Image (cartoon, rainbow, N blue to C red):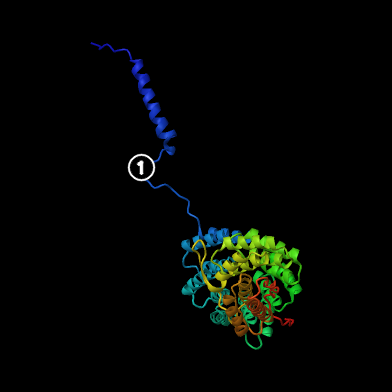
Amino acid sequence: MNKRRKPPNYFNIIILLSVIGVVMYFGVLKGPDVQRSFLPTPTATRSPESFVSEASQFFEQGKLPQAIQSYQQAVRSMPNDASIYIALARTQVWAGKAADAQISAENALLLNPNNSMAHAVRGWSLDAQRDFLASEISIKRALELDPNNALAHAYYAELLSDQYSQGTGPFDVLTRMSEESKTALSLAPGLLEAHRARGYVYEVTLNAEEAIREYELAVAINKNIADLHISLGRAYRSLQVYDKAVNSFTTANQLNPSDPLPLFYISRVLATIGEYAKAEQYAQQAVKTNPTETNLRGNLGVMYYKNLQWEKAATELALAVNGGKDADGTVIIPFELAPNAATRVAEYYFTYALVLTRLGRCGDALPISQKLRTVVPNDEIAVYNANEVIRLCTEAAAATASPDSGTPAVEATAAPAETPTVTPTP
């Protein structure tokens, strides 16, 4: 009555167990490594605060482009926080991007029209763009909203100093710019901008030793900001401490290689001490850094002139005086000679006239000389060189009948410092 059992098939059992083991291995042990279809890959989300912290660290390290980028990422993460726009704007001014800074500050004002700091930074950015009237309106508004805004007082001191340098400030500008810089320091003794503003007040009033002291205090707060080293170099240059001036400009160039200004200043210092060949090299590097900058073109022309390269000098100075395109098609906007123009502009004009005289082009040189005597009659060096051009061209015209006669050699008088001649103590 009992059915006989078949013996177990051990081969099938082994196969079954193997299949189960393979399924468990790939499903359990290897499963986390296999990308599942149609499911999003998990990504870490950074907080806006982490971008702000990162930007602040970049600023302390002098890495301003990276700081700007991090602040912009923070803005995208938290677009309704006005403080981030303000921090971005401050960094952009330090980086030489004043127009961008104005936009950032105005974005902050869209969020809060009564933000004192936003008005202050906007005013600073406008001062950097030489829009003095709009700058003053913004800074005064900042101080109306918060009379104890140390940054606003520092920016106001800088604005008044710029107005004083341009001869456009109020009658009591000296007193006011000194008071504003002192107020900024009293409110925030450790504020970078406060020491910078006080140093700038000293610099424009030709108190170079005091300017150096304040600039060095600012550098001690943050040694990685290129602009501070440029300011320090200018002060050393005015004291004729040329080795320290070159060191400061070199440090600025290392911190911000994209800015041609340190190279420009180095070329001027080297030319002052008679190292014309090196001066020419730095002037060339400056032009390569920013080929569209008219001032750099004029400076390169002056360096060519000092190295007796008349044709090259004429090419570069023509771009500075007349504008036009260079050999690469880069458009250069000319400098306009005006009574309130920077001293350097007059230098480019009279050096161009001297170069043209050297090349026997008195027909082009004489109108420039006449313009110099008419437009900047109080610039003694410019008028002297203009008269030299007229004298040489007159002698050349009188000597045309004599084939052995030549044009007497003439050298441009050294350009004056770009500072006022008044030396009041702030």
Comparing 227 with 385, the one in front is 385
* In this view, 411 is above or below 7: below
Given the current orientation, which residue lies at the most extreme bottom position? 171
Q: What x and y, as percent, mark residue 148?
A: 62, 78
Q: Horizontally, is 131 left or right of 278 in the view?
A: left
Left or right, 272 with respect to 162, comes to right
Residue 361 occupies quadrant: bottom right
Q: Which quarter of the rendering shows the N terminus?
A: top left
The residue under label 1 is 37
What's the residue type where badge 1 is placed?
Ser
Residue drawn 50% across the image and 62% down it:
72
Q: Position of residue 409 (x, y in %)?
A: 70, 71
- The image quadrant that residue 417 belongs to is bottom right
Question: Can residue 226 be spotted in the picture?
Answer: no
Give above or below for 124 relative to 61: below
Task: Place residue 335 in its image quadrant.
Answer: bottom right
Residue 258, can we see it? yes
Closest to the observer, 336 or 342:
336
Work out whether residue 357 or residue 299 is closer to the camera in this orientation and state it: 357
Quarter the C terminus occupies: bottom right
Say above or below: 126 vs 316.
below
Mark 1 residue element: loop
